[in-house]
Image (cartoon, helix red, strand yellow):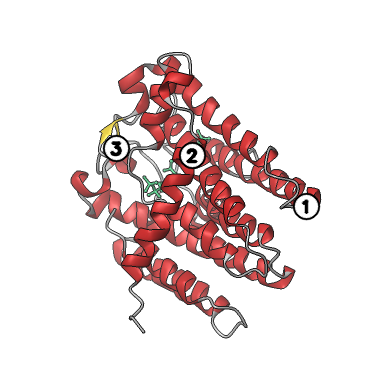
């Protein structure tokens, strides 16, 4: 029997996510110019595809095999993620010039197209879930997935977190306030990936609960690592300007705690996340490895 290689497994899952995105994204020619090019530019431009891979892994824990549905959901979360990055980079938000090593969407296509590009990616994502084959997925589960996607993307999740982030600029937040903000801005989408993958595969409720708790922990750890990379990383690896958080006068974990304590907090969250799954009657080894990817990533 050949030995399991995590990097090879990750690469394979990433390719599944990539082809699902390509399958659902309209070609530039199908969309009024230059919007189609902006959409393709902002989604098919690298990215670790961690969120899409999390969907596929959570789905693997279920009793039912619905690969087309799982892959469509992996595209859905990556489209929402890409939309949030395009809008987050806008001059009215974080005003970032680079994303994934290339000029950000508004720098390439103008602010008007970047706004519409984000809008189109978000609506496309909802269109995909709404149109998922009812014969393979019950109406009840599909409706639950739609409402979970809406809650994680809307005021209870990404958008709410973004508002808190904008309002916090120039202020020093407490650790609790920072965690609250990031559990929405970063944690909600990561948690969503695990929840929708699991629900689509009809994973048992108590395991879905554990997966959500696992998602909240790795989501916060992901954000702390992001803050650390903003100080310790390089443009070549991270693909965006370094020190953008401190330049933008934002509260970050390293700023609040110092780099060492922030690193320790991140490692503790990962260990707590791992403990949530260890010992459960599920094949959680690959999800545990993915949690470690969050902590050890350099981009
Ligand atoms: C709705 C405008 C709007 C924003 C929502 C999610 C969000 C708030 C903004 C996105 C920018 C940001 C800093 C999010 C925090 C999460 C994060 C660190 C995203 C980067 O994710 P990676 O590293 O990116 O997975 P890749 O490029 O690998 O996909």
- Badge 1 local density, few (<14 within 10 Å), some, or many (20+)? few
Which residue shows up at 37% across the image and 70% down it?
264
Which residue shows up at 47% across the image and 41% down it?
21
Quadrant location, the N terminus: bottom left
Q: CA distance from mark 3 to mark 1?
A: 48 Å
- Badge 3 local density, few (<14 within 10 Å), some, or many (20+)? few
x%, y% of residue 239?
26, 42
Against 186, residue 130 (above or below) is above
| Residue 265 in sight from this viewpoint | no
x%, y% of residue 132?
67, 43
- Helix or strand or loop: what does disc 3 sit on? helix
Against 178, residue 92 (above or below) is above
**Marks 2 & 1, CB-CB < 8 Å contact:** no
In terms of sequence position, does the residue under pointer 3 or pointer 1 come before the other? 1
Residue that numbered label 3 is attached to: 247
Which residue shows up at 47% across the image and 14% down it?
32
Residue that numbered label 2 is attached to: 23
Residue that numbered label 1 is attached to: 138
Against 284, residue 122 (above or below) is above
- Helix or strand or loop: what does disc 2 sit on? helix
Q: Work out which residue is located at the far right of the displayed protein and give it.
A: 140
């Amino acid at each position: 029997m050949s030995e399991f290689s995590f990097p090879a497994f990750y690469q394979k899952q990433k390719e599944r996510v990539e082809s699902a995105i390509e399958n659902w994204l309209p070609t530039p020619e199908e969309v009024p110019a230059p919007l189609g090019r902006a959409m393709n530019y902002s989604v098919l431009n690298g990215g670790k595809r961690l969120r899409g891979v999390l969907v596929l892994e959570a789905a693997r824990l279920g009793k039912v095999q619905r690969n087309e549905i799982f892959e469509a959901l992996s595209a859905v979360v990556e489209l929402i993620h890409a939309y949030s990055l395009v809008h987050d980079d806008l001059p009215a938000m974080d005003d970032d010039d680079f994303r994934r090593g290339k000029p950000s969407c508004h720098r390439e296509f103008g602010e008007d197209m970047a706004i519409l590009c984000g809008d189109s990616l978000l609506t496309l994502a909802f269109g995909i879930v709404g149109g998922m084959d009812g014969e393979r997925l019950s109406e009840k589960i599909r409706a639950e997935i739609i409402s979970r996607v809406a809650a994680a993307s809307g005021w209870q999740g990404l958008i709410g977190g973004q508002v808190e982030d904008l309002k916090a600029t120039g202020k020093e937040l407490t650790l609790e306030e920072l965690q609250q903000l990031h559990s929405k801005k970063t944690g909600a989408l990561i948690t969503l990936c695990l929840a929708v993958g699991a629900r689509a595969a009809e994973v048992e409720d108590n395991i879905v609960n554990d997966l959500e708790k696992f998602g909240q922990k790795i989501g916060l750890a992901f954000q702390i690592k992001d803050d650390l990379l903003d100080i310790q990383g390089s443009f070549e690896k991270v693909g965006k300007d370094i020190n953008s958080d401190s330049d933008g006068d934002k509260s970050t974990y390293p700023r609040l705690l110092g780099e060492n304590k922030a690193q320790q907090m991140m490692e503790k969250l990962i260990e707590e996340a791992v403990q949530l799954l260890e010992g459960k009657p599920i094949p959680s080894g690959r999800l545990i490895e993915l949690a470690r990817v969050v902590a050890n990533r350099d981009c």
